[in-house]
Image (cartoon, grey):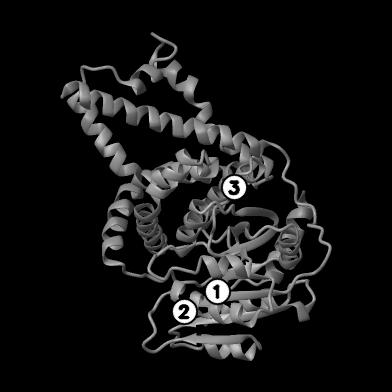
Amino acid sequence: MQLLFSGISNFIQVFLVFTGFFYLFISLAGLRPVVRRPAGADRLHRFAVVMAAYNEEGVIAYALDSLLRMDYPRELFDVFLAADHCTDRTVEIARNKGVSVFPHEGALPRGKGFALKAVCDHIISLKRYDALCFFDADSLAHPDFLRQMNGHVDRGECAVQAYEEPKNPDDNWLSRMAYVSQTIFNRLYQYPKHVLGLSATLHGKGMCFTPDIMRRFPWDGTCLTEDIELQMRLIAAGVRVSFAPAAIVYDEEPTSFREHIHRSVRWAAGALDTARRHLVPLWTRAFRKRDVRAFEAAVRLTQTYRFAILLALAALIWLTHDSFHFLSWLFDRPYGAQLRYKLVHWSPLFFYPLVALLMERARPRYFLHYFLMPALSVMTGLPVFVLGALKNRKREWYRTAHTSRVSIDEISRRQARAAAED
C-alpha cells in the first residue's frame, strides 16, 4: 500500500511540474511582437451583434452606444438585445436606441444561456448574416472591432475571440490587479496559443461565430459559465477558436471585494460543471486523435480541481514521508545548496510574468499590484473553490453588479493621453 500511495503521489507531482513547464513553454511564443495590423478582407460581411442583459439600466446605454458607433457600414450590421427577465428600464433604453429587443421573460427559463439561444435561433432563421458577435451589457466595443472581425471571417475562421482588457483599470486596487492579470493572460497565454495554432479561450464578450457554428453548438443555459462550456464543446469536436489580437473589447472589472468573490465563485462553479461534462471527452480526443488543442484544453480544465489535487497530494506526502518525492528532489537542485540560494535559483519563475507588463508598456503603478496578486490568491483560492463546488450543486445564479459608467469616448481620450505621455 505504501508503494501504491508513493506512486500516486509522485505521478501527481510530476503532472503538476509538467503543467507548469508546459505553459511556460507556451508562453515563450508571447515574447515575439504582437501583430495588430488591420485585418484585410476581399469583401465586407454582414454581422448580427448580440448583447445579453439582465437589469442593466445603469450601463446599457454606454454599451449600446459603443456598438452602434462602430466604424463599419451601418447597413451591414444589426444590434439585438436578449433581455433576460428584465424588470428595470433596460428594455426601454435599448428600444430608444433603436436596437431590436427580444424579451426573454414570463415562464421561459431564466439565464443568459437560455436568452442567447432564443435570440440566436431567430437570427439564424433569418438567413441574413454571415456571423454573429456577442457582447455583455457591461462591455464596450472598440470602434474598429467589426472591421477586424470581418477580416477573420473572410479568412474562413468560424469561431473567434477578441482581445479583452478592462475598461476601468484605475478605479481601485482590485481593478488594477485585474488589469495586471488580464495583461499577463493576453500576452503570455492567449496570444502564444494563437501563435502556436492552439485554441483561444472564450471570454463571454468579444466573441464571433458563424451561423453554422451556432446551429451546431447552441448555447447551453444550464451552465453558469456558458462561454467556457461552449469553448470545451468546440475543442472536443475539433473546432479551433481563433484569436483576434487587433479586435478589442473592454470589460468592467469588480471594484468591491464582495463582487469579486461572488464573480469568482460563479466562475469556479461553472468551471467545475464544465470539467465534469467535458474533461473525459477532451482527454480521450487528445490521445486518440493526437489532438494537441484538445490536450491543452484538457490540461487547463484539469486545473479546475487544483485545490482538491493539492489536498490529496499533501495527504499522500504525509502518508509516504519516508519515500522518494519528486518535488523535494527537484527543489534540491543544485544538490546541497543553502535554502536562500535555492530560492534565488527558482525566483526567475516568479518574476517572469512581469515581462508581459514591460512588453505592453504598463504604467509603473501596475507593477506593485503584481506582487499583491499571490496574497489575494492564497487568501481567497480555497474558499472560492469550496463555495464554487457548493454553488455548482445548487445551480444558483448570482448577477455581478455593473456600475462603471465609462463611455468609449472616455477610453479613446485616456488612450490618447497615454500615447502623448509616451
- Where residue 18 sits, quadrant-wise, is top left
Indicate the position of residue 191 as horizontal and vertical percent values. 63, 46
Indicate the position of residue 363 as horizontal and vertical percent values. 65, 47
In this view, 354 is above or below 161: above
- The amino acid at mark 1 is Ala
Characterize the local packing of mark 1: few (<14), some (14-19) or many (20 or more) Cα atoms within 10 angstroms.
many
Q: Mark 3 points at which residue?
A: 190
Q: Are marks 1 and 2 in contact (CB under 8 Å)?
A: yes
| Mark with earlier residue (3, 2) | 2
Identified at 72% across, 67% down, the residue is 146
Position of residue 330 in the picture relative to residue 169 (left or right) = left
Is residue 59 among the parts visible in the rendering? Answer: no
Element under disc 1: loop
Identified at 64% across, 36% down, the residue is 29
Identified at 59% across, 75% down, the residue is 50
Q: Name the residue under label 1.
A: 137
Q: Viewer-nearest of labels 1 and 3?
A: 3
Characterize the local packing of mark 3: few (<14), some (14-19) or many (20 or more) Cα atoms within 10 angstroms.
many
- The amino acid at mark 3 is Gln
- The amino acid at mark 2 is Tyr
Element under disc 2: loop
Q: Name the residue under label 2.
A: 54
